[in-house]
Amino acid sequence: MARVTVEDCLANVDSRFTLVHLAVRRVLQLRHGALPTLENLKANKEVVLALREIAAGKITPDNIRQIDESRPLPAEPTMQESDVARADLQEILDEVISYGASIEYGTSDRYLEEDQPPEIPQTE
């Protein structure tokens, strides 16, 4: 298929409105890591690939949800990665505390000028 046209895609969907929504949903799937149903030999952008899939009949309003639901879950970090991240966080906290910084919120007595409430003139 040298070029994808709207007419090629409309043969597989009801209307242009449906085509737009189907293409958008498929592009988002591809951008989030879904595998293409066609070979992407020319390294086309996601929009072109989505339209090619629709024109080829691989993506339809009926099967788009199945493809969306079969998206793999993100991998959870391993215990070793969690331990490394926890150690890095503890190192950062220890360094911050060594400088005398407080990690409690709202304990500072210093305010910026903008943060001060407006002065109310006293009437006598």
Image: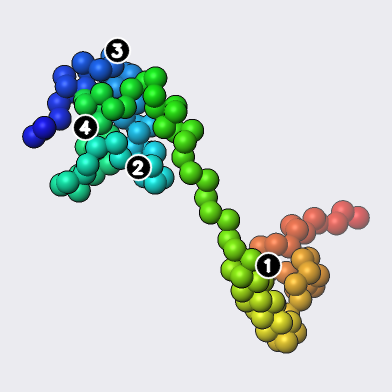
Among all residues in the image, which is located at the extreme top?
Answer: 14
Q: In whole angstroms, how far apart are the C-alphas of marks 2 and 3?
A: 25 Å
In the depicted structure, whether residue 78 falls above or below residue 37: below
Q: In whole angstroms, how far apart are the C-alphas of marks 4 and 1?
A: 60 Å
The dot on residue 35 is: 2
In the depicted structure, whether residue 116 falls above or below residue 48: below
Q: Say which of marks 1 and 3 sits in front.
A: 3
The dot on residue 52 is: 4
Figure quadrant of residue 90 = bottom right
Q: Position of residue 15 (x, y in %)?
A: 28, 14
Residue drawn at x 73%, y 87% is: 98
In the depicted structure, whether residue 3 falls above or below residue 108: above
- Mark 4 vs 2: CB contact within 8 A: no
Q: How crowded is mark 1: few (under 14 residues within 10 Å), some or many (20 or more)?
A: few
Q: Say which of marks 4 and 1 sits in front.
A: 4
The dot on residue 113 is: 1
For the C terminus, the image quarter is bottom right
Residue drawn at x 16%, y 19% is: 7
Q: Is mark 2 on a helix, strand or loop?
A: loop
Q: In this view, does 71 lie to the left or right of 44?
A: right
- Can residue 47 be seen here? The reply is no
Q: Where is residue 68 in the image (x, y as percent from the top left)?
A: 44, 33
Q: In this view, does 18 lie to the left or right of 94?
A: left
**Residue that label 3 marks:** 14
